[in-house]
Image (spheres, rainbow, N blue to C red):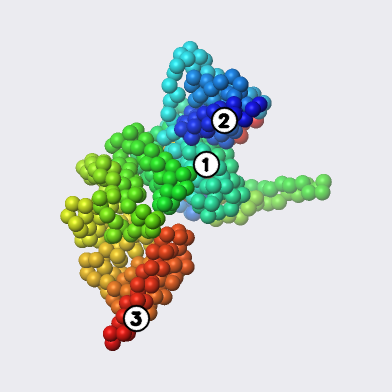
Amino acid sequence: MPPENDQPARQAAAAVARRSYGKLVAFLAARTRDVAGAEDALSDAFAAALADWPSSGIPSSPEAWLLAVARRKMIDASRRRRSHEDAAGYLRLLQEELEAAAASETQIPDDRLLLMFACAHPAIDPGIRAPMILQTVLGFDAATIASAFLVSPATMGQRLVRAKKKINQAGIPFRLPERADLRERLAAVLGAIYAVFSEGWSDPAGTETRRRNLAEEGIWLGRLVVALLPQEPEGLGLLALMLHAEARRGARRNPQGEYVPLADQDPQLWNTPLIEEAEALLLRASRMGAVGRYQLEAAVQSAHVVRRLTGKSDWAAIERLYDALAAIIDSPVVAINRAIAIAETRGPAAGLLALDALAGDARLAEYQPYWAARAGLLARTGAQAAADQAYERAIGLEADPAVRRFLQQRRAQLNDRSDATQFSA
Amino acid sequence: MKYMLLIYQNEAGMLATSKEQAGQILAAYGAYTEAMKKAGVHVNSNRLRPTASGTTVRVANGKTEVLDGPYAETKEQLGGYYMIDVPDLDAALSWAARCPGASHGTMEVRPIWEM
């Protein structure tokens, strides 16, 4: 068939794929507990759409069309297998199909949250939870996820297959956990959502549409959790944290595409409605009386952006918040940020002492922010040579070219200053 | 779905408990089994005699080999099981957590592979 006819159908299929992939997988998986089968059936349905839509036209409800085809594929597949477990899922699907036929304009129920709870179930290996959510709810392929999580595509593929099989065979439910387990299980879901968001956030230039979408998808998943579980303060906290970060997206690069650190950002470029939404969420969360990691991290952001009103970040509050965070999570990121806050409240020498306390942590040898923070504080105490060495390590560890250039500039300024000192001496 | 709740515990420790303690544990298991029956999830259950009473059998090169003792020497031994029929893994896990075996040993929850 001529390619010009093909184009709108392809675009329509791609649009539905982006918008509704996770919803359709969740709907099918929640009724069969067969995540891999749901994905296979859907990919068959998308292939069928590409074959059918160019000649018969794009259906009035592409989502319903795809779901109907995918359902038929799943039923066919389970008929072929004919095992006991499949039979129950098969009958449930048939029943759903009958119901859908009775009311042709039914809204497809949104089971994505249930799918997330299944992916983040305690019986699933913690390391594979975020990748599973990326794949099943957002439709990323194993190779893309593998590169984001720094493992080989083959390994990631195998781990995803194994986890889906576990959901199916162990009978992991697609429903909200019992009240007593909710908080703990929600923490796993939130952790996975934050991993999705952070992956998108790691492309600050916004050049890669796929990654920017990830930050948006993370926020979207966060909103979904808040809408469905409005009484969970950590869900509110995570959404507030992501909105705060998102509010500053535009300010992280200057018009030339160069990196601008938070302290140098122009508050005029921050997105005020997003900040206000984040602040309102955080306030709501704080009234629920259960402080947690995401609320504390969002509060740190809040203490930074208070600068748009007062002209100065509230470093004393930031130090206290990182103290509280350090007490609940063992993370070099928290420890480094705490040291930076201490440098602001008590001077660079005190900040350096706090960094020195981390020196035994083997993870830091490869961790750019540690060396960048160290270099910045050494420079401020006048230890030029040590600062120069630390900048060199930070530059060598950085993957983002804009940040690398920024660090190189800082390093050059350091040497300019030392030259100036030499000349004046 | 049917699940097997396998109770692993330190057999030597269990055999060394006082008569009074053993009685308490037995009573706890009795109450647990009864609760399962009342909830309509109990399919069957059994206690196993100690591993010393076990015998392993295998056929190699057409020759039947019979050995005294358990299949493998482990720190904790399979001491009994419950088979239950519940809607999903969460339900199975919450029953496993209630088993007296969960507090003095380890429960393994395995789905039954229906044939």
Question: Relative to B79, does residue A335 appear above or below in the rendering?
Answer: below
Marks 2 and 3 in Cβ contact (< 8 Å): no
- Amino acid type of the residue tagged 2 in the rendering: Gln
Question: Relative to A92, does residue A412 appear above or below in the rendering?
Answer: below
- Amino acid type of the residue tagged 3 in the rendering: Asp
Residue A419, numbered circle = 3
User: Which residue occupies the foreground of this view, A88 or B47?
Assistant: A88
Residue indicated by mark 1 = A140
Q: Chain of mark 3?
A: A
Label 1, residues with CA under 10 Å away: few <14, some 14-19, many ≥20: some
Q: Which residue sits at x=48%, y=44%?
A: A210
Q: Residue furthest left?
A: A310
Residue indicated by mark 2 = A7
Q: Is residue A279 left or right of residue B72?
A: left
Q: Secondary structure at mark 1?
A: loop
**Residues at marks 3 and 1, CA–CA distance in whole angstroms:** 51 Å
Marks 3 and 1 in Cβ contact (< 8 Å): no
